[in-house]
Amino acid sequence: MGLTRDFFISLSQNKVLNGAAKNWGLKLGAQTVVAGTTVEEMVNSVKKLNSKGIAATIDNLGEFVFEKQEALEAKRQILAVIEAIHENALNAHISLKPTQLGLDIEYDFCLHNLKEIVSKANEYSIFINFDTEDHSHLQPTFDLLDELSKDYNNVGTVIQAYFYKADENLKKYINHRTRIVKGAYKEPANLAYQDKEEIDKNYLKLIEYHLLNGKFTSIATHDHHVINHVKKFVDEHNISKDKFEFQMLYGFRNELQLKLANEGYNFCTYVPFGGDWYGYFMRRLAERPQNLNLVVKQVFNK
Ligand code: FDA
């Protein structure tokens, strides 16, 4: 299991394969978890979700951005997605990774790009979520959020429960709309819990705290134990359904997504799209090798 995870993580980081895959179109079963390569395809996917009462957070996929030109192109694409949300009156907002907008190139350049995006989205009242990446990008991501929060209130970020400091950061951003996750990256033991039970325990603790004290809580998980716990907790504490939402990734547990929406819970699907799908897809395989079934089916169902 650990070996498989490391194998797929290393594939996700392979720059040659990442580059090559941009020319492949969606392959290897990726089309079940990636909502198209173009804005038009993504809009159609989001319309289908919206028609079922499910909102979307749209991620324009991008990896390994070390050139200014690539970051500017990512910004251009995200601005086009914002226009598409507005024009099509989609029930949707944006998720982005600061590294895609140039965080690894130069902090001020990234800030400038993000400001343009957040300002445009603000005109249309569209929320922008800064996804959190590995620990080396965490503080700069919070710094970007702090800077932009001075002028805009349509921004928020993600708290990863595996970090010992998650509790402190959750409290710092208590007045922001916040997504809470377990955490997806391999982090060192001096910074993050390694044990699944400890991560799960901290995850529930953070969710409960935010539901009771926070602005709006996005509970992003495929774990039905967590979801059932939250359902019970909100009932017991009379927390209204408009204070929180569940989130899952596009193509995962589709029946459960629909069931929760039909039960009257706010539900938001994370919708990744774009030509740069390869690293994202490999990380999903690393997380849950059962997803390999997707690949096997695609390879044999030609
Ligand atoms: P986990 O993987 O711990 O699984 C727990 C249990 O749930 C499993 O044992 C199984 O029983 C069940 N289960 C899980 N997946 C299933 C499936 N596909 N089918 C059936 N049963 C399943 N991370 C990060 O570091 N930064 C970020 O910004 C984000 N953003 C984000 C947004 C959204 C919408 C989601 C859903 C996730 C993220 N993540 C993230 C990823 C997150 O940190 C975490 O790595 C994954 O969600 C995996 O953990 P889970 O909580 O889903 O369950």
Image (cartoon, helix red, strand yellow):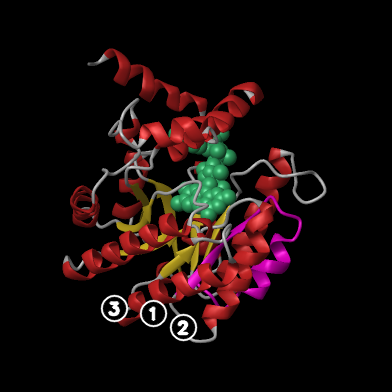
When the figure is inspected, residue 58 is found, relative to residue 200, above or below; the finding is below
- The residue lying toward the viewer, choosing from 59 and 19, is 19
Q: Report the Cα–Cα distance between label 3 and label 1.
A: 9 Å
How packed is label 2: few (under 14 Cα within 10 Å), some, or many (20 or more)? some
When the figure is inspected, residue 265 is found, relative to residue 154, above or below; the finding is above
- The residue range painted magenta reads 155-177
Q: Report the Cα–Cα distance between label 1 and label 2.
A: 8 Å
Position in image of residue 230 (x %, y %): 53, 55
Q: In this rendering, would 227 be left or right of 24?
A: right
Amino acid at circle 3: Tyr
Disc 1: which residue? 119
How packed is label 3: few (under 14 Cα within 10 Å), some, or many (20 or more)? few
Q: In this rendering, would 22 be left or right of 199?
A: left
Circle number at residue 9: none
- The residue lying toward the viewer, choosing from 91 and 101, is 101
Can you say which quadrant of the picture contains the N terminus? top right
Q: Earlier in the sequence, mark 3 or mark 1?
A: 1
* Count of numbered marks: 3
Disc 3: which residue? 124
Residue at x-position 23% and y-position 57%: 50
Q: Please tell me whether mark 2 sits on a helix, a strand or a loop.
A: loop
Amino acid at circle 2: Tyr
> Is disc 1 in contact with disc 2, using a CB cutoff of under 8 Å?
yes
Position in image of residue 192 (x %, y %): 75, 49
- The residue lying toward the viewer, choosing from 31 and 289, is 31
Q: Quadrant of residue 88?
A: bottom left
Q: Please tell me whether mark 3 sits on a helix, a strand or a loop.
A: loop
Amino acid at circle 1: Ser
Q: Earlier in the sequence, mark 1 or mark 2?
A: 1
How packed is label 1: few (under 14 Cα within 10 Å), some, or many (20 or more)? some
- The residue lying toward the viewer, choosing from 239 and 132, is 132
Circle number at residue 152: 2
